[in-house]
Amino acid sequence: MWMGQNQEEQRARVAAKEAFVQGLTGSGVTEIVVMTTLPTVLSIIYMAIESIVVRCGCSIRDWRVAIVLGVMEYGVMIVPQIMGMTEAYDAYAMLVVASVVAFVLIGLGVGKKRDAEQSQEPHQHGDMRPPPYTVALEEGGIKDAVSMHRAQVMLMTCLAILGVDFRAFPRRFAKTETYGTSLMDAGVGSIVLCSSFVQGVNQMKSPRYTAKRLKDSWSSLLRVVVLVLLGIGKPVVTSLMGYQVHVGEYGRHWNFFLTLAVLRAVIMNVPRSTSPLALGVTVAGAHQYGLSRFGFGLGELVNSDARGISLLQQNKEGIISLPGYIALHFLGLWCAKVFVWMASLRVRRHINALLLLFVGFLWTTYWALAMYVEPVSRRSCNASFIAWMLAINVQAMLLNSVCLRYMRSHTDMGSRTVSKRSNASPYLPPLLNAVNRGMLYIFLAANVMTGGINSFVDTLSTGDIQARRILAIYMAVMYVFSRTLF
């Protein structure tokens, strides 16, 4: 509870914060694409800087160099996102300036690849062709592109869950009430898709990787149990801390942790022989039919303010949206497999064009569904929301893949030594590697810090400059936490 307040003042403050996030309609898709593209450009800037440092003969193992690079990593990859999410600078202008800086730094870092590195390129061995998908999934390829996107999504999520409580955070970036698109809406679907992308890449990488193996894995079962416990514990903790809960997001007792738990439980029981495309389209179609007036009319139910006394009616948003998230996962799994397959074709000159056509197909599908079926709704996770999430995330993965492939071929990026046990990549910034290794713990730490800050700071009365300072300190703590422990 906020220090120095009685119960009436506390209830009034919580009610004001709840009203602060209600009735929002979101922003345009173009602005969201700009905001989600910026982290990739910032990551490329840092990687170019690190490449230049290596070319200058500095050892990144030297503790002094490591500290300087660590400060630069935070300053380059985190601070501009804080400025963008709080509108300190125009997002479009920031993307243009960052892109120019990236091109200049890449130009300075470009050099002839060392002969030893060139001799290791798979396509340089004449008739000795690598196994299927080896080129696409090797270090610096699609696997790293997925890892890069996954970490970027988590960093943006950590920043947004605290930033949304300040007035400096534009209301159009916060989650929409019923229909519309927003930055935080994109974060919810992106977290689901990042998991499906990882599973899809792993299935293409190893023929022995099967859904049955996941089913028999105690670690997967443990994750479900942990997510259920987190889902049950979150409303209890938020109630004790006096933190506001917007019932219109998932319901009175439901939350995103429970959605992830159900989703993972379903995934564990679906055999790999099942076509992800057929399953995804079938579930999405049935879900959309159930939402429509011609079906069960669940769309009207989930968007109405009426709320009965049963658990289903109390948590209608979270429960009704479940089939949509299940469809989103399996369609994301299919997209990841298609992406890897296309990137592994022998017609290397046309790979980017083929992938771009695939992204265009996804955007066209989104546009058609949003125009002629139903507008985007995160609350119900309808068909147009699913298509929107697929388009924006596959596009981000394509951008990451193109950038990493170029950096890998033309710069000294990848000279960093990493342990294979850590599942880290020498082609990614250390922060992104750390976030990928400790995803759940970092997200939990961000939630705990968000609740703690809200308990001691009246965020609605905090000015924009002070809000940016708090967010900068908060993200600095998250940076040190991630780099130190993971």
Image (tube, helix red, strand yellow):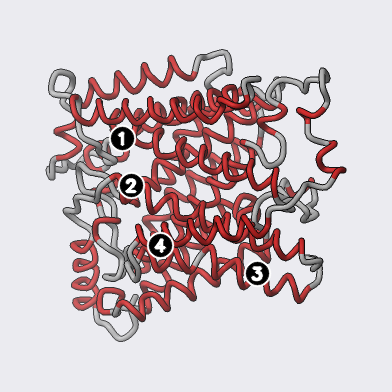
- Residue for point 29% across, 56% down: 173
Label 3 – label 2 distance at C-alpha: 31 Å
- The N terminus sits in image quarter: bottom left
Labels 1, 3: front one: 3
Labels 4, 3: front one: 4
Mark 4, residue position? 94
| Image quadrant in which you'd find residue 165 | bottom left
Label 1 – label 3 distance at C-alpha: 37 Å
Amino acid type shown at disc 1? Phe
The answer to whether residue 173 is left or right of residue 69 is left
Which mark is drawn over residue 385? 1
- Report helix, strand or loop for mark 3: helix
Amino acid type shown at disc 2? Asp
Amino acid type shown at disc 3? Gly
Labels 1, 4: front one: 4
Picture coordinates of residue 178, whole percent (x, y): 20, 43
- The C terminus sits in image quarter: bottom right
